[in-house]
């Protein structure tokens, strides 16, 4: 190839590259529409995020109940503290995908223009035995909610939900029947 031929080839290649680059960046065709697969992936991601939010809300409610019972009946602390720690780990695992301790639930100030009302205090029975029965019922309700969510959960999260549901069933047993053994 001669020098002129090479220059012509290089110039043609550069022109083709510039044309391709302009074609990629031009907005003449309008915004790109997401494909069906992209729309489905987004729908699945939104559904999983909503499922996680519901699961965490259920677990947090249970954690609040533990905190309320412990505040009302400090004598139950040796029995309830290990179970509460487990529920706190469930809150973290369900929401963030990890495990670890979670501090007692407390109202934290949120940066917003409107103040948010603090949640209503969890009612606790005056009798410790009744408070334990109510806590066991809350564990069963929470466990059932996590088990029901299994059907809509992706596989990895479903395994976590199954584990948390089983743990809740064990907690309910320990709060009622386990005390008699």
Image (cartoon, rainbow, N blue to C red):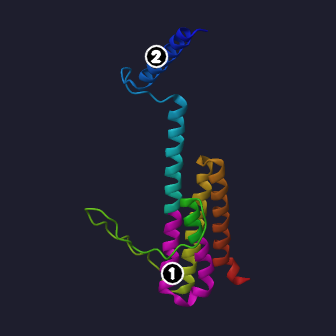
Task: Report if residue 47 lies within the magenta region.
Answer: no
Question: In percent of the image, x 48 and y 84: which residue is there?
Answer: 71
Farthest bottom residue in view = 75
Which tag is nearer the camera, tag 1 or tag 2? 2
Would residue 130 appear left or right of 116 to someone viewing this image?
right
The kind of secondary structure element at disc 1 is helix
Tell me the crowding category of disc 2: few under 14, some 14 to 19, or many 20 or more residues within 10 angstroms, Cα based: few
Judged from the image, the secondary structure of the residue bearing numbered disc 2 is helix
Report x, y in % for residue 55.
53, 58
* Tag shown at residue 18: none
Work out which residue is located at the far right of the displayed protein and give it: 181
For label 2, the residue is 15
Mark 1 or mark 2, which has the lower sequence index?
Answer: 2
| Residue at mark 1 | 69
Q: Residues within 10 Å of mark 1 (few under 14, many from 20)?
A: many
Main secondary structure found in the magenta portion: helix
What percent of the width, then of the height, locates residue 112?
Answer: 29, 62
Residue 153 in the image: above or below residue 5? below
Choose between 165 and 86: the one closer to the eye.
86
Q: Is residue 176 visible?
A: no
Please give the name of the residue rendered at 49% of the width and 56% of the height, measured from the top-left corner: 53
Question: Quick one: quadrant of the C terminus?
Answer: bottom right
Residue at 47% x, 85% y is: 72
Q: Is residue 79 magenta?
A: yes
Start-end of magenta stretch: 58-87
Residue 113 lies left or right of residue 10; in this view the side is left
**Which quadrant does the N terminus fall into?**
top right
């Amino acid at each position: 190839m001669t020098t002129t031929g090479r220059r012509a080839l290089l110039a043609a290649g550069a022109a083709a590259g510039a044309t391709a680059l302009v074609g990629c960046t031009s907005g003449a065709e309008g915004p790109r529409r997401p494909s069906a697969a992209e729309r489905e992936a987004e729908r699945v991601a939104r559904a999983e995020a909503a499922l996680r939010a519901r699961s965490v809300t259920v677990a947090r409610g249970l954690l609040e109940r533990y905190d309320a019972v412990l505040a009302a009946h400090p004598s139950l602390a040796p029995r309830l503290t290990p179970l509460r720690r487990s529920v706190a780990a469930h809150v973290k695992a369900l929401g963030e995908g990890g495990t670890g301790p979670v501090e007692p639930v407390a109202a934290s100030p949120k940066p917003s223009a409107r103040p948010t009302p603090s949640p209503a205090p969890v009612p606790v029975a005056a009798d410790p035995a009744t408070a334990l029965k109510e806590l066991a019922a809350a564990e069963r309700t929470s466990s059932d909610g996590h088990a029901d969510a299994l059907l809509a959960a992706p596989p990895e999260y479903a395994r976590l939900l199954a584990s948390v549901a089983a743990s809740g069933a064990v907690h309910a047993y320990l709060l009622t029947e386990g005390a008699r053994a």
